[in-house]
Image (cartoon, rainbow, N blue to C red):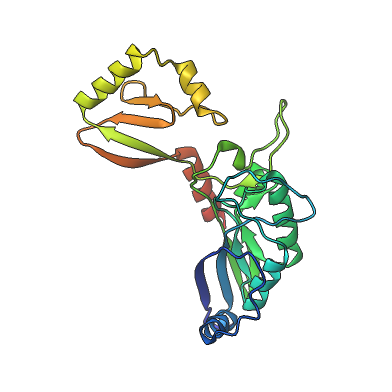
Amino acid sequence: MNNRFTLAVTGQSLIKHDIRAIPAPAFGKVRSLLRQADLSFTNFEGTILGSHGGWPLKGSFFGCSDPVVLDTLRAIGFRALSLSNNHAFDLGPSGVLSTLEEVEKRDFLHAGLGRDHTEVSRPSTATIGGRRVAIVAMDGGPGPDFMYAANADDNRPGRPGVNRLRLSQVIEVDGTAFDQIQAIRDKVGYTAIDLTNDSQPDDPPRLAPESEIGISRAVFRRSERFGRSVKIDEADLARNLASIAAA
């Protein structure tokens, strides 16, 4: 086995049509580099309109592509795809199933989408250039809860979707401001039921009752400073790290 393994990594490919005929010399140079690598990777920033159909679930930021774009990516030189991003669910579960179907037809190494939560959590592996290669992909949003894959239980079927790393944005305020926000919430009669309704179709955020307040889709946290921070869901983090370790 050759001790050298070349990995080419790019950012997102938000691709809507076949670009193989582009004559630009710079494009040709990029294509040559990708083809020379043992493995070339990109994030397919989209969803496929295929045999499972689907309906737009976004407004002006909606996007989908015909399966030919995957032929284009393959011809350019890509063999590995992340499918986990904020456009992956633009056609709903139908688009997820079509994307998986078309990606699997073309034998891409891929991760980030699955037919349920169990499948989407697994690393994807292959032997390339005599080496075992694994990929794990996840999305931190923004996106509604229903875009993320879920397992079936006694009360509901499974849901095809995206692999999640839940991130929650928090607005940090000092004690005086926190008390004022709390007083305003109480004076206008904003209750836990209001928070639940305003959070739909998602579940309401999980709050630390002594130090966090939720109003509509904003979470305020008592702090020593003013600022913004991101809270990472510990269960999602542990699950994805376990997948990486298992790979």
Report the side of 51 relative to 152 (left or right). right
Task: Measuring from the top left, give residue 95's x and y in whole percent.
Answer: 70, 50
Residue at the right extreme of this rendering: 51
Q: Against 40, is 55 above or below?
A: above
Report the side of 214 relative to 106 (left or right). left
Q: Residue at x 30, y 18 (%)?
A: 184
Task: Measuring from the top left, give residue 69's x and y in whole percent.
Answer: 67, 67
Residue at the bottom extreme of this rendering: 25
Q: Residue at x 70, y 34 (%)?
A: 152
Q: Is residue 223 visible?
A: yes
Residue at the front extreme of this rendering: 60
Q: Against 204, is 166 above or below?
A: below
Quarter of the figure that contains the N terminus: bottom right
Q: Against 13, is 211 above or below?
A: above
Q: Residue at x 56, y 69 (%)?
A: 41
Q: Is residue 129 visible?
A: no
Q: Against 73, is 220 above or below?
A: above
Quarter of the figure that contains the C terminus: bottom right
Q: Quadrant of residue 105?
A: bottom right
Q: Quadrant of residue 181?
A: top left
How many numbered circles are shown? 0
Task: Measuring from the top left, give residue 64's x and y in whole percent.
Answer: 65, 56
Q: Residue at x 68, y 50 (%)?
A: 96
Task: Measuring from the top left, give residue 233's x and y in whole percent.
Answer: 45, 39
